[in-house]
Amino acid sequence: MLFDPERRAKFDTRKFVAEKNSKAIRFPEISSCARSLKEEHGFKKVGAVGFCYGGWAVFQLGAKDNALVDAISTAHPSLLTNEEVDAISVPVQILAPEHDPMLTPELKAYCNNTIPSLNVPYDYQYFPGLTHGFAARADEKDEKAKKGLERAKNCVSSWFGHWLHVN
């Protein structure tokens, strides 16, 4: 659908998010899953990665009063708020494309100024020339996009390998 201009033009994103996939609707399901991994399945450490709409969710999973995960990573997060950034209490990785209407220059600056002051490990990875969605749906015919996607995958893998390692 994303690559079909006619279908994309007919899709009402605001309605899709507000009526069926709001934070209030989805977070209870997401947090229940994260809680289950530790409580019911016995995982000692859990990480969460959120692409686009999942970005806000991983921040909430790693919040001070919630901390259901031990580390988070997000690529081109959408709907992320300053309050969610302020509340983070676990190691954070952000994969930021140069061009992103959702991860604005102001929000990038807020994250880069705030997260280091929270005394949590922070890794900010910048992807020049790339756009929102690069880490989830890159055009693999575009060499720059393909290399960005590969780099993003390797960054996340390394990040979680470090923070979720269990002896």
Image (cartoon, rainbow, N blue to C red):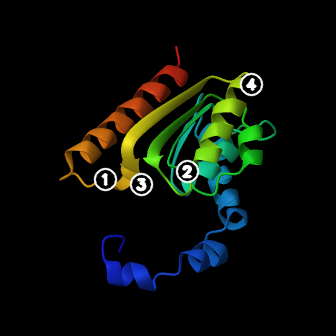
Residues 135 and 64: in front is: 135
Instruction: Tell whether 156 sits left or right of 143.
Output: right
Query: Along the polypeptide, which appears first: circle 1 or circle 3?
Result: 3
Looking at the rendered structure, the kind of residue marked 1 is: Ala
Identify the amino acid type marked 2.
Pro
| For marks 1 and 4 on the same chain, the one whose residue lies earlier in the sequence | 4
Q: Does any portion of residue 69 appear in the rendered image?
A: no
Q: Distance between the residues labelled 1 and 4?
A: 33 Å
Q: Residue furthest right?
A: 65
Q: Mark 1 points at which residue?
A: 138
Mark 1, other Cα within 10 Å: few <14 / some 14–19 / many ≥20: many
* Quadrant in which residue 154 is drawn: top left
Secondary structure under tag 3 reads loop
- Mark found first going from the N terminus, 4 or 3: 4
| Residue 143: x %, y % from top left | 20, 45
Spatial CA span between label 2 and label 1: 15 Å
Q: Residue furthest left?
A: 141
Please name whichever residue, 107 or 77, is drawn nearer the observer in this view of the structure: 107
Q: Which of pointers 2 and 3 lies earlier in the amino acid sequence? A: 2
Q: How far apart are marks 1 and 3 (CA)?
A: 7 Å
From mark 4 to mark 3, how far is it between C-alphas? 28 Å
Which image quadrant for residue 109?
A: top right
Kindly check if marks 1 and 3 are in contact, taking CB atoms under 8 A apart as contact.
yes
Q: Name the residue under label 2.
A: 77
| Residue at x-position 49% and y-position 28% | 160
Disc 1 to disc 4: CB gap under 8 Å: no
Callout 4: helix, strand or loop? helix
Is residue 111 shown above or below 80?
above
What is the CA distance from the residue labelled 2 to the residue labelled 3?
A: 9 Å
> For residue 117, which numbered disc appears in the image?
4
Q: What residue type is labelled 4?
A: Ser
